[in-house]
Amino acid sequence: MNTTKFYEVITANENRMESDVYDLLIGMVREEIARESEKAAGRKANIRNAAKKMLSKDTTRMYLTKTQVRTINGKKYYAQIDGFRMSWSPIDFGFGTVEEFESINFERIIDYRYKNPGTVKVNKADVIQFIKEHRNDRTPFKIDYGNGNYILLNPHYLKDAIDFTESNELVVDLDNEFGNYPVMLHNEKEDRHALVLPIRR
């Protein structure tokens, strides 16, 4: 069935359906349209899947279960935030958006500046292997960045950030001896970004 036509039929009959049925159907169709759009645009499915994983499953904080929207420097950005990690880009993946009054001001988060920024490369294959080897425990992934400094990250969150940005360069604060500052990954060319909070030591 043509998804766009299905969307038109549902929206045209909104008043004939119960609101929870309408919301369920329109959400499913929007997600399928977004998936088709991504495919048509030549984007890889794992980018969208990684963004979806960054939405919270916590129904007590509904504002984290949908996409946050902010205009930054005249450009609209869509962010997926679960409280431990975040992805943001100009791409609306069709996960639904939070009402403006509930929206998090994520501009303040992404404007965070390190005292001594530097980059550390990580091998995605190493992260995947680590996840497989530690499938039954919660061992954090350790990233050393010199002078005895290191950071501990949830390996699944790190993999999702790598998938979303398609970057293996982590921006860290090289003076962060306690490993408590977030790491960021950027794909400047395609304007896709991610942030992962560390695991406290």
Image: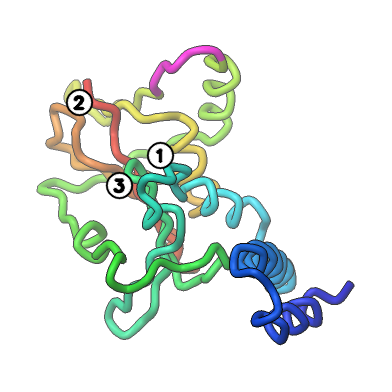
The circle on residue 175 is none
**Amino acid type of the residue that numbered disc 3 sits on in the rendered structure:** Val
Q: Could you tell me which secondary element the residue under label 1 belongs to?
A: strand
Where is mark 1, residue-wise?
121
Sequence-earlier tag: 3 or 2: 2
Q: Is the magenta stretch mostly helix, strand or loop?
A: loop
Where is mark 3, residue-wise?
171
User: Left or right: 114 with respect to 69?
Assistant: left
Question: Toward the viewer: 173 or 74?
Answer: 74
Magenta part of the chain: 136-140
Q: How far apart are marks 2 and 1 (CA)?
A: 15 Å
Residues tagged 1 and 3 counted as in contact (Cβ below 8 A) = no
Q: Residues within 10 Å of mark 3 (few under 14, many from 20)?
A: some
Q: Position of residue 75 (x, y in %)?
A: 36, 81
**Amino acid type of the residue that numbered disc 1 sits on in the rendered structure:** Lys
Q: Position of residue 108 (x, y in %)?
A: 19, 62
**Amino acid type of the residue that numbered disc 2 sits on in the rendered structure:** Asn
Q: Position of residue 179 (x, y in %)?
A: 20, 30
Let me know if residue 40 appears in the view: yes
Q: Residue at x 58, y 67 (%)?
A: 94
Q: How far apart are marks 3 and 2 (CA)?
A: 14 Å
Question: Toward the viewer: 47 or 68?
Answer: 68
Q: Could you tell me which secondary element the residue under label 2 belongs to?
A: loop
Q: Could you tell me which secondary element the residue under label 3 belongs to?
A: strand
Q: In this view, does 192 lie above or below 10?
A: above
Where is mark 2, residue-wise?
149
